Amino acid sequence: MSDMVYQEDTEKIKAEADRLDSAFKKFAKQEFALDAIDQSFSVNKNIFFDAVLRVDKVKFYSKVFHDGNSASEYKEIAAYAYWIMKLSPISWKIESTHCEYYSHINEYFALYLIMHVIKACCKEKAKRCFAPRRRFIRDVFYSFRFRDLSIDALTLFIETLAFSYDIYYPHDADEDDSMFSTLRELLSDPD
């Protein structure tokens, strides 16, 4: 073990939380065709901040407890999905019962983050098209809603998806960290 102590970089965490908020708005506009997102959703930015802070701690403690090795990009994506589902920073302002996605918007957004990154990596590496069956998406969404999944379980899920679409590479490989950079792009794309 190391005597390293986590030190919060508030500005970095706030900037990342703002990017996560922007990614959510992009998702909401794309998935629900909403122009007035702020009128439809309530996003607690303090909870987004807390989620990003917890992801940052996962990355830090991964270095501490794994001989200086940073968390894999798979684990980082899993940590984002996990904390979004657990902390539930997003809620609908309008009560709606006609779609299960509305009442479970945090799980849906977590699923979107994972699937978006996998799809973008498949496209970037010119591998086979990422087009999971609708049943698969429903089953994963069901698991996100009703099963208590750990960050490690989500990491294994993401690694399995990456492996099955031939975009998996070991964390210590010399290849470009395309999955990590795709997550960074998603969180930094203001559109």
Image (cartoon, rainbow, N blue to C red):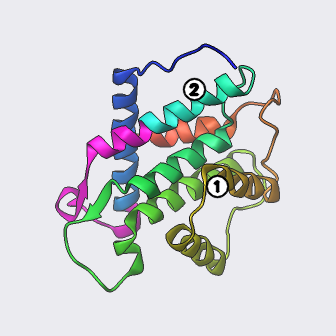
Mark 2 Cα within 10 Å, few/some/many (few <14, many 20+)? some
Question: Which residue is more in the foreground, 155 or 57?
Answer: 57
Which residue in the structure is indicated by mark 1? 154
* Numbered tag placed on residue 60 in the rendering: 2
Question: Which residue is more in the foreground, 60 or 187?
Answer: 60
Picture quarter with the N terminus: top right
* Numbered tag placed on residue 72 in the rendering: none
Name the residue at 73% across, 27% down: 66
Check the image and name the residue furthest to the left: 39
- Three-letter amino acid code at disc 1? Leu
Mark 1 Cα within 10 Å, few/some/many (few <14, many 20+)? many
Locate residue 73, reporting x and y percent: 65, 38
- State which tag comes first along the sequence, 2 or 1: 2
Q: Is residue 14 left or right of residue 71?
A: left
Q: Secondary structure at mark 2?
A: helix
Residue 43 higher or lower than 10, as above or below: below
* Image: magenta residue range: 30-52
- Three-letter amino acid code at disc 2? Phe
Q: Secondary structure at mark 1?
A: helix
Locate residue 145, reporting x and y percent: 50, 71
Quarter-of-image position of residue 70: top right
Q: Is residue 55 left or right of residue 12?
A: right
Locate residue 177, reporting x and y percent: 70, 33
Residue 182 higher or lower than 147, as above or below: above
Quarter-of-image position of residue 19: top left
Q: Is residue 184 left or right of residue 136?
A: left
Check the image and name the residue furthest to the bottom: 98
Residue 53 higher or lower than 143, as above or below: above
Q: Is residue 191 visible?
A: no
